[in-house]
Image: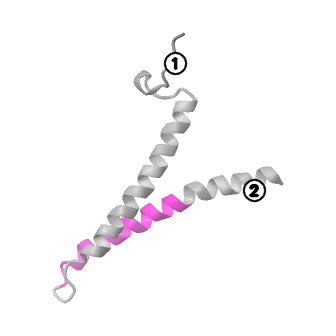
Amino acid sequence: MKAVISRFIAMLLLVVPGLMATYGFLAMKDAWFAQFDPAIGFLWWKFALGLLLFAAGVAFIGGWIFFRDRKRNYVAPRFRKKRKKG
């Protein structure tokens, strides 16, 4: 039972940033296409919030993948951990 709960929490740690990035992308898209309606204009705050959410979500998921691959030695030699000499 403990493994099921920990896997569920781990899945949520990846789903929440994914949803943030998705909402951010959709907010940026809505703000961009709202500029073509003369009554609304460009929604700067919605675009900025969307950009922030999109960047944060993608950065979190990208960092998670990078550190997972680094742990399993799937990355290029320049990204591997430096070993202490001595």
Disc 1 marks a residue whose amino acid type is: Arg
Q: Is residue 71 left or right of residue 52?
A: right
CA–CA distance in space, label 2 to label 1 = 35 Å
Secondary structure at numbered mark 2:
helix
Residue 7 point in image, percent of width and height: 70, 52
- Which of marks 1 and 2 precedes in the sequence? 2
Above-or-below relation of 63 to 71: below
Of the 4 image quadrants, the one containing the N terminus is: bottom right
Disc 2 marks a residue whose amino acid type is: Ile
Residue at position x 59%, y 56% in the image = 13
Q: Is residue 66 magenta?
A: no
Magenta: main secondary structure = helix
Residue numbers of the magenta segment: 16-37
Rendered image: mark on residue 83: 1
The image quadrant that residue 47 belongs to is bottom left
Which residue bears the numbered disc 2? Answer: 5
